[in-house]
Amino acid sequence: MPASLPSMPEPGSAEAAARQVYDRLTAAGQRVTGAALGRAIGRSERYGRLLLADFRAHDEGSDRHNGDGAASGKQGDPMTT
């Protein structure tokens, strides 16, 4: 049996629901914890932490950095002040 490639979560899945919660909270500037994410979708805190780690790892290489001035060039160099 061939290995399946990772894909987008199916609509209505727990992962899709968690991603919506994560996106909404980060867009509002709120801190997201894995435990709270798991509870928000009716799953375990551990599952929420796993999903949060996955979302953050996926977002690392994108321009989706909530409040990260260094990533957007808006933060001064601390060595020059």
Image: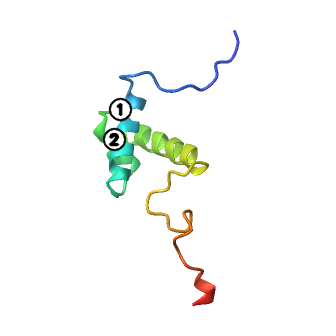
SS for callout 1: helix
Look at the picture and state if 54 lies above or below 42: below
Q: Is mark 2 on a helix, strand or loop?
A: helix
For this orientation, the residue located farthest to the top is 1
Report the amino acid beneath label 1.
Answer: Ala
Q: Which residue is drawn at 36% across and 37% down?
A: 20
| Label 1, residues with CA under 10 Å away: few <14, some 14-19, many ≥20 | some
Colour scheme of the picture: rainbow
Q: Position of residue 74 (x, y in %)?
A: 52, 71
Mark 2 Cα shell of 10 Å, populated few (<14), some (14-19), many (≥20): some
- Closer-to-camera residue (38/67): 67
Q: Quadrant of residue 1?
A: top right
Asked which quadrant contains residue 46, the reply is top left
- Looking at the image, the residue that sits furthest to the right is 2
Q: Quadrant of residue 5?
A: top right
Residue 25: mark in rendering = none
Residue hosting label 1: 17
Gap between marks 2 and 1, in whole Å? 6 Å
Give how far across and how far down residue 25 sits, in percent: 33, 49
Q: Nearer the viewer, residue 49 or 11?
A: 11
Q: Name the residue under label 2.
A: 21
Q: Identify which amino acid the numbered label 2 is placed on.
A: Val
Q: Are marks 2 and 1 in contact (CB under 8 Å)?
A: yes
75 or 13: which is nearer to us?
Answer: 75
Residue at the extreme bottom = 81
| Vertical placement of residue 76 versus 29, above or below | below
Residue 75 image point, x, y percent: 53, 74
